[in-house]
């Protein structure tokens, strides 16, 4: 019914978008994410990049989703813990896709 209006124009963007979608699905099942090999587990949220839902940490400590690695948690980042409570109230349907 709805057609995407922000179609990426370059093949590079298309490729990156598919990688990001996949990463988003992988991380969507995780309780949290580490940045690279960092010890801190961050809460996950979703950002829109070129019309694609991409994973991001709630405290915005890192902007590159490809550096995020899934973690079983628990979330140990204090800034994420402070933010995620608020965002859970505001985005109640975010995890419902996984239950279908
Ligand atoms: Zn964090």
Image: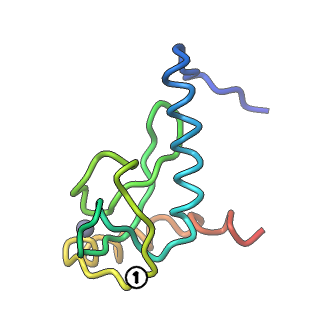
Q: Give the residue furthest to the top.
A: 9
Q: Where is 89 relative to 27, above or below?
A: below
Residue 53: percent from the left, percent from the top? 52, 46
| Residue 99 sits above or below residue 53 on the image | below
Q: Quadrant of the N terminus?
A: top right
Q: Please state if 59 lies on the left or on the right of 74 as rendered.
A: left
Q: How is the image coloured?
A: rainbow
According to the picture, the residue beneath numbered tag 1 turns out to be: 73
Image coords of residue 52 (percent x, y): 53, 39
Q: Secondary structure at mark 1?
A: loop
Image region (quadrant) for ligand 1: bottom left
Q: Residue at x 60, y 65 (%)?
A: 93
- Of residues 3 and 99, which is closer to you in this image? 99
Q: Quadrant of residue 48?
A: top left
Residue at 59%, 57% (x, y): give it. Answer: 25
Instruction: Locate the C terminus by quadrant.
Output: bottom right
Label 1 neighbour load within 10 Å: few <14, some 14-19, many 20+: some
User: Based on the displayed image, in which of its 4 quarters is residue 26 positioned?
Assistant: bottom right
Please name whichever residue, 13 or 94, is drawn nearer the observer in this view of the structure. Answer: 13
Estimate the x, y position of residue 71 in percent, counting from the top left.
Answer: 42, 74
- Seen in the picture, residue 87 relative to 78 is either above or below; the reply is above
Residue 3 lies left or right of residue 55; in this view the side is right
Q: Is residue 38 left or right of residue 29?
A: left
Ligand 1 is within 8 Å of the C-beta of the residue at disc 1: no
Count the labels in the image. Answer: 1
Residue found at x 51% / y 63%: 27
- Please state the horizontal and vertical placement of residue 87, each as a whole percent of the image: 39, 68
């Amino acid at each position: 019914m709805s057609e995407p209006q922000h179609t990426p124009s370059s093949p590079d963007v298309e490729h990156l978008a598919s990688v990001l979608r996949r990463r988003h699905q992988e991380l969507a099942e995780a309780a949290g994410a580490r940045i690279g090999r960092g010890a801190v587990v961050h809460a996950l949220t979703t950002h829109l990049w070129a019309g694609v839902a991409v994973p991001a940490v709630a405290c915005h400590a890192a902007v590159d989703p490809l550096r995020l690695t899934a973690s079983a948690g628990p979330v140990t980042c204090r800034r994420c813990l402070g933010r995620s409570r608020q965002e859970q109230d505001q985005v109640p349907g975010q995890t419902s896709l996984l239950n279908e």
